[in-house]
Amino acid sequence: MNKVDYHLHTEYSYDSKLKAEDLIVKAIQLNYSLIAITEHLDLLPQELSAFGLPPFKKYVRRMKELREKCASEALCIVCGIEVGDFHRVRLQANDLLAELDLELRLGAVHFLSDHTNVAIPLPKPLDQDQTVDYYRQNLTLVETCDIDVLAHLGVHKRYYSAAPDESDFHGLLKDIFQTMIERRIALEINFSGLRKRYNRILPEPEQIELYRELGGNLFTLGSDAHQLEDFDAHYESLPGWLFGGGIRFPALS
Ligand SMILES: [Zn+2]
Ligand SMILES: [Zn+2]
C-alpha cells in the first residue's frame, strides 16, 4: 500500500517537540512513500505575541539536509507549511512565504470572529452562528489565498461526541467545494478525529461525497500528528476507496 501523510508537525511548530529524524525513521519502517512536514505559520496578533515566529529559514535548511541524507530511501520528504487563518493575515503571510522555498501550503481556519479557537477542545459545541462563521471563513480562505490544500475542514467537531446535523450548511459547503475545484485546491482528509472522541474522519464521508459529486478529485491525507505515537495511528481505518484509484494527490510545486 502506498502510504502518504501530507500534514505533520515537528519541533518547529510551537505545539510539537517531535524530531523530524524520528518521524522519518518511522515512516521508512512503515513503508511510507511520502511525508509532508507542515509547520505552523500563525500570524494573528494573539498568536504572534504568545509564540513568536519560528525560525523558518532554519527549518527549510534542516529539511534539505534531511532529504539529502535520505536520498537513497524510497521516501519523499516534503517541506511544507500550515498557514493558520491565512485570509486574515494575507499580506504579511505572502511576504514571508515569498522568502521561503516551500513545496506545499496548507490553509486552515483556527479562529472564529469571536476569537474562539476551534482547533483545541471546546467547552461546548459551536452554536449556529459560530458554525456559519466557521464555514464562511473557510470559504473566504479558499477564495482569496494561494494554497495547495484546505486542511481539517470541520476541525471543531473533533471534540464532539456525535456527528451534528449540518444540513443548514449544505449551501456553504457546496460553495467551498466548488471554489476549491475551480482553484485546484485539494481537500484534506484529516484523520486526527479518529484519535479523539468523535472517531470520524474530517470532513465526514457524506461531505467528501458532496465534493466528489461536484467533480472534486484532488485529495490529500493528513494525520495532523504532533507526536510520534500519533503518526500512522488508525491509518488502517481509512476508507478503502481512497486507495482504490480514481482520486489524485496534488502535484507539488
Ligand atoms: Zn490546524
Ligand atoms: Zn496541523
Image: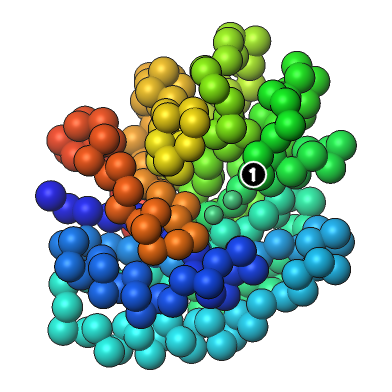
Q: Residue at x 34, y 35 (%)?
A: 217
Place of residue 151 in the rendered image (x, y in percent of width and height, measured from the top left): 52, 46
Q: Amino acid at mark 1?
A: Ala
Relative depth, front residue between 97 and 13: 13
Number of numbered discs on residues = 1
Q: Residue at x 44, y 67 (%)?
A: 37
Q: State whether residue 226 is above or below residue 77.
A: above
Residue 45 is at least partly visible in this image: yes
Place of residue 13 in the rendered image (x, y in percent of width and height, measured from the top left): 59, 69
Q: State whether residue 48 is above or below residue 148.
A: below
SS at mark 1 in the image: loop
Q: Residue at x 26, y 35 (%)?
A: 237
The part of the image, by quadrant, that contains residue 52 is: bottom right
The part of the image, by quadrant, that contains residue 114 is: top right
Residue identifier under label 1: 119
Place of residue 152 in the rendered image (x, y in percent of width and height, measured from the top left): 53, 41
Relative depth, front residue between 174 and 161: 161
Q: How is the image coloured?
A: rainbow
Place of residue 197 in the rendered image (x, y in percent of width and height, measured from the top left): 49, 31
Ligand 2 placement by image quarter: bottom right
- Crowd band around label 1 with a 10 angstrom C-alpha radius: few (<14), some (14–19), many (20+): some
Q: Say if disc 1 is inside 8 Å of ligand 1.
A: yes
Residue 92 is at least partly visible in this image: no
Q: Which quadrant would the C terminus be assigned to in this image?
A: bottom left
> Horizontally, is 151 left or right of 117 in the view?
left
Q: State whether residue 57 is above or below residue 112.
A: below
Q: Residue at x 69, y 67 (%)?
A: 94
Q: State whether residue 229 is above or below residue 238.
A: below
Q: Residue furthest left?
A: 1
